[in-house]
Image (tube, rainbow, N blue to C red):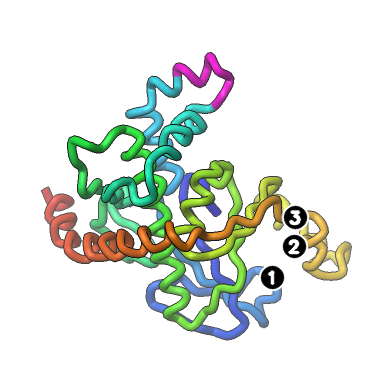
Amino acid sequence: MLGTSMCCGFISHKPRISIKLINYPYVARDREYLYSFAGVSTAGYCIRWFRDQLGQVEAEAASKLKLSAYALLDIEAAKIPPGSDGLIFMPHMMIGDRAPYWDEYIRGGLLGLTLYHSKAHIFRAFLEGVAYGLKYSVDAAVEADMPIKRAILVDGGAKSELWRTILADVSGLSMDYIAENPGAPLGDVVLAGVGTNLFRDYDVVREWVKSSEVVKPNPKNREVYDRLYKAYLQAFSRLRDVFKGLTSQ
């Protein structure tokens, strides 16, 4: 789920507990499935911050062109090569982040910035930084012996075709994008319907929710992102004490 926050849910048949993940019985068929959870607290929130603080020109143009400021920012960012020419964004703009980071001091950061980089570079780096957070969550699930057979992408941030592509390229996962997604209210209806025997079982949701697009990773782009993802992990590890020091000021 890619909204203000990014929530990565992993559903498995057997208990595979990981200290990097939040683990609890799945809301449907709780005796059969375990739900493990991770993500990035500020995903779409980072993008909104960028628009509000640095995207005033796009916001003004968008109102005249009857487009969104995000769409205009995407157009420029799509011209930038994968990896943003060595620019890495750490998407932790609250002080602290939850699973899989479990770090109360972590903050956002922009690494590798040079005079060569443009606003479009920075915006693309923001999109990629959230994708690195997705990969870190996916890696935590894989380390816990949870093979990822299918990935489903929903919510407002997923409306960006560029962001969907970046998420697939960075994670290496093929993703089913569901454009028409009623979200939690639909889940409430299904749970209530099964609980009152109005619906036979939870499979009714398959009739209502359909994949709009399958986004597949580009192997060439993934090579670039694998290298930068390693740098992202190094930065997270080596800056922990720095972030802690900043928070104590």
The magenta stretch spans residue 149: no
Question: In the drawing, what numbered circle is on residue 210?
Answer: 3
Res 184 seen here: no
Rendered location of residue 50, percent (x, y): 36, 35
- Along the line of sight, the residue nearer the viewer: 75 or 132: 75
- Along the line of sight, the residue nearer the viewer: 103 or 166: 166
**The residue stretch that appears in magenta:** 60-67
- Along the line of sight, the residue nearer the viewer: 215 or 191: 215
**Distance CA(mark 2)–CA(mark 1):** 8 Å
Task: Answer with mark 3 or mark 1, whichever residue precedes in sequence.
Answer: 1
- 194 lies left or right of 175: right
Kind of residue sitting beneath label 1: Ala
Rendered location of residue 121, percent (x, y): 33, 39
**Distance CA(mark 2)–CA(mark 3):** 19 Å
Tell me: residue 53, above or below residue 6: above
Question: In the drawing, what numbered circle is on residue 191?
Answer: 2
For label 2, the crowd category at 10 Å Cα-Cα, with few meaning under 14, some 14 to 19 and many 20 or more, is some
Helix, strand or loop at label 1? It is loop
Residue sitting at 60 percent across and 52 percent down? 154
- 55 lies left or right of 66: left
Q: Do the residues labelled 2 and 1 touch (CB within 8 Å)?
A: yes
Helix, strand or loop at label 3? It is loop
Q: Which residue lies furthest to the top in this view?
A: 64
Kind of residue sitting beneath label 3: Lys
Q: Mark 1 points at which residue?
A: 28
Kind of residue sitting beneath label 2: Leu
